[in-house]
Amino acid sequence: MRHNESYAKYEQFQILDEGGARPAGETVPYLVPRSGEHHIALPTSFFENGWIYVLEDSEIAFLLMLFHLHKTISTQFWVKAETYERLAHFGIGRDAYGAHEVLKIFGLIDVQIGANRRPDGRIFRPASYPDGDRPLNRFMLTPEGFENLGQASAIAALRGLI
């Protein structure tokens, strides 16, 4: 078999809709969202520079939440996510929420620690705040961080912690 013949099987390759397997009916081809349709746009450098391979699933989920919040609220300002919103809308629990620490170390986000919070995120005197009125951390994406090579940046950041 010649080299070109081995690639012939990919000539009619079609990406399918990511909605999962359907119980019946034809498969649905994937369509790129139009500008008016709801979607999350990631920088191409997230893929081109290997961040997709460096980050854990929880870190990627946290980033997706931030990209969504920045798109729906504002791209230029700090965003925050209430506990209920993180859990109900994004499935980001307490452990996955901790991913922001790694993303900050890697230079992908900036974090403003909420007033009266310790560096680990716990609140000084939590009983003094009624539920839903606790100070929240705020986050901002740093797009220039994605321009760096993921693996090299992660290794350098982790070595800096030692």
Image (cartoon, rainbow, N blue to C red):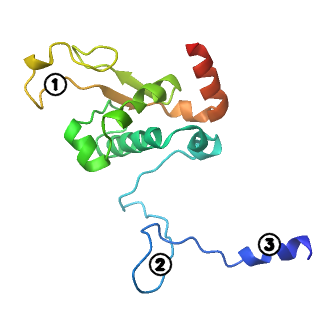
Q: What residue type is labelled 1?
A: Arg
Residue 7 numbered mark, or none: 3
Out of 63 and 83, give the one closest to the viewer.
Answer: 83
Q: Which quarter of the rendering shows the N terminus?
A: bottom right
From the top left corner, tell me how far across and down residue 158 is, in percent. Answer: 58, 21
Residue 86 vs 3, above or below: the answer is: above
Looking at the rendering, which quadrant does residue 12 occupy? Answer: bottom right
Q: Which comes sooner in the sequence, label 1 or label 2?
A: 2
The residue carrying mark 2 is 28
The residue carrying mark 1 is 134
Residue 34 located left or right of residue 118:
right
**Proximity of marks 3 and 1: CB atoms separated by less than 8 Å:** no
**In what element is the residue under mark 3?**
loop
From the top left corner, tell me how far across and down residue 133 is, in percent. Answer: 12, 27
Q: What residue type is labelled 2?
A: Val
Q: Which comes sooner in the sequence, label 2 or label 3?
A: 3
Out of 126 and 36, give the one closest to the viewer.
Answer: 126
From the top left corner, tell me how far across and down residue 100 is, in percent. Answer: 41, 30
Q: What residue is shown at x 62% (from left), y 27% (from top)? A: 153
Q: Which comes sooner in the sequence, label 3 or label 1?
A: 3
